[in-house]
Image (cartoon, rainbow, N blue to C red):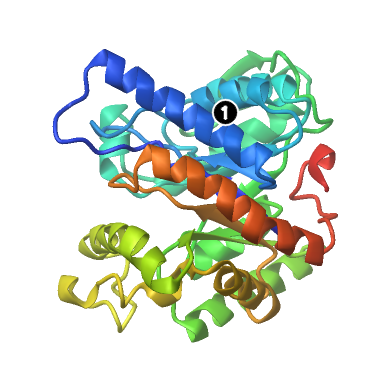
Amino acid sequence: MRVGYLIDTHRRTATRPEPPERRAVMDAMIAEGVAAASAGFHSIQVPDRHASPECHFAGPEQLLTVLARETERVAIGSFTSVATLTHPMKAAEQFSVIDNLSGGRLFTTMSRGFLPAFWQQFGVPQERLLGRFLEALEVQRLAVAGEPFTFEGKHWQVDRGLLAPPPYQVGGWPIWGGGNAVPAAIRRSAEYASSWTCDPLPFERAVWEASAELYRERARELGKRPFIVMMRDGWVASSFEEAANVFGEHFARQVRFYQREGILSHHPDFTSQEDITGVSVAPHVVMGTPQQCIERLEFLHEELGVDYVTFCCRLSTGPSLEATLEQVHRFGEEVVGPIHRKYPAPDHPAIPEACRW
């Protein structure tokens, strides 16, 4: 089991920040990623964000390019890259540059996406998005092979395309699959990707176990070794109460947003906004003393079969960038270190070969 770190590229402010403040926030996010690498996290991951005044890095490519140069050993990847937004050949070019700059440490989580504002911003039709997504995956598969190719799809076309530079990793970087509680999306993850990833939202154990088994069965049918990645938010402190006071309400605000969007309609404990509090969401985060955080990660691995955890400790509303930097070092030293020492290094195609430590 390994623990990676996700940088939230949203930062909410009372008013739209002026250029000096924007630059300061961007510098702080870069420092956050570098700190995660030095603190012992196995990977640094960046989301795909657009169409919001809170966003400081639009899309994962820019920040990953910087981190490819600023780090040496840690894996770097998207969580996720919305493959339906831009031409897949353009995306492949940008990711291939990152793969080369990093010396083969790149992986990309690919997803169809779910926020209409993203597609609207780029003028992308919102019909037949699944077909657009699957074609994007095929274009990328052809591109990373390193030979000229032509592709005539219903949504994307490539005429005598050539990916330059070619990927550092022979055959291309690992692809992680997106998809949560939707059975078809879970099965697709097994088909096009080397892992199945899950977001940090609350889940019911019975639903989780059914979803995980669906993924594992399909992966094995295809001759693949299953690899499950779960994102969890949280905070380590001297007591659970302290951690909850610092972080709990920030996570609750995020859960309320997804509840309004209908994403949690299946969860009986969160049927209304009033159900969502810092206390009610506590079982769905990695939060508390170092030992409590370690025990939660052990539970995810040993009881739920999670192979990899993507950890995030700062959301758009906070905590502060300064407190986050301290938290990254503390969580790395007091939680990630013991977990990595306890469990063997991953030897799986989902992990770039250079990062199987």
Q: How far from the left and from the top, in percent, is residue 204?
A: 44, 81
In depth, the one of 126 and 308 nearer the eye is 308
104 to the left or right of 159: right
How many marks do you count on the picture?
Answer: 1
Q: Note whether 222 is above or below 87 in the view shown.
A: below
Q: Which residue is labeled 1 in the image?
A: 64
Name which residue lies at 73% across and 36% down.
Answer: 173
Residue type of the residue flagged with mark 1? Leu
| Residue 150 appears anywhere in the view | no
Q: How far from the left and from the top, in percent, is residue 260?
A: 20, 62
**Secondary structure found at label 1:** helix
In depth, the one of 310 and 28 nearer the eye is 28
251 to the left or right of 179: left
Q: The N terminus is located in which quarter?
A: bottom right
Q: How far from the left and from the top, in percent, is residue 126?
A: 31, 42
Q: Name the image quarter holding residue 43.
A: top right
Q: How far from the left and from the top, in percent, is residue 66?
A: 57, 21
